[in-house]
Amino acid sequence: QGSPRKLPLLRTKLLVSLLVPLVALLTVDTFLSYWTSLRFAERAYDRSLLEIAREVALYSGAKGGSLTFDVPESVRKVLLSDPSDHLYFEVATADERLVAGEPLPASPYAGARKSAGEVFYDGRAHGEAVRIVELPLAGDRDKGRPPGVVRVAETENKLNELAREILRRAVGELARQR
């Protein structure tokens, strides 16, 4: 009489003891997959952001020993417009005096700019989360251009959408394999 009642209880215990670790494992796997896809998306996103910063740097020059920035309005509209994200830029002197654009947060890795090339980091502009690239401008004695820095920031709408798309495809592929 007592054993039929214990069988469903045993099944329930087995189901729970297997289901809880399985759900935990799937949760951890989903988090790691999202983190990995976000890193891949960030690398691709950083490359395109760096290209914009290099283009902005091409329009820097010198006049009277001072750093200048001169870009035709038509080029500025093409270079710094995006239908799904906001783009911001800054051209500044080595001592952080604004030459063009609008002030953006400086790199939290202050020494890295001097020893390496571009630096990527996250920040905020106009209250929005942005990805920023900081590109040093070397001084050019022949042209009389002092050293400076170019910063380009972009909101993260495309970045997050790309990460979600990578995750959707990875999860979809896993589901098809099972």
Image (cartoon, rainbow, N blue to C red):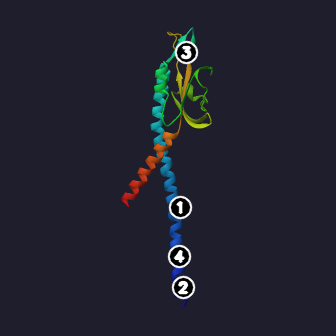
- Mark 3 vs mark 1, CA separation in Å: 56 Å
| Amino acid type shown at disc 3 | Thr
Q: x, y percentage for residue 18?
A: 50, 69
- Mark 4 vs mark 1, CA separation in Å: 18 Å
Q: Earlier in the sequence, mark 4 or mark 1?
A: 4
Are dots 2 and 1 in contact, CB under 8 Å? Answer: no
Are dots 4 and 2 in contact, CB under 8 Å? Answer: no
Secondary structure at badge 4 equals helix
- Mark 2 vs mark 3, CA separation in Å: 84 Å
Name the quarter where the C terminus is drawn. Answer: bottom left
Report the disc number at residue 12.
4
Q: x, y percentage for residue 131?
A: 54, 35
Q: Earlier in the sequence, mark 3 or mark 4?
A: 4
Q: Earlier in the sequence, mark 2 or mark 3?
A: 2
Between residue 129 and residue 86, name the one nearer to us. 86
Q: Earlier in the sequence, mark 4 or mark 2?
A: 2
Q: Which residue is mark 1?
A: 24
Secondary structure at badge 1 equals helix
- Mark 4 vs mark 2, CA separation in Å: 11 Å
- Mark 2 vs mark 1, CA separation in Å: 29 Å
Q: Which residue is mark 2?
A: 5
Q: x, y percentage for residue 42?
A: 49, 39
Q: Which residue is mark 3?
A: 68
Residue at coordinates 51% horizontally, 82% vertically from top-left?
A: 7
Between residue 81 and residue 173, name the one nearer to us. 81
| Amino acid type shown at disc 2 | Arg
Secondary structure at badge 2 equals helix
**Closer to us: mark 3 or mark 1?**
3
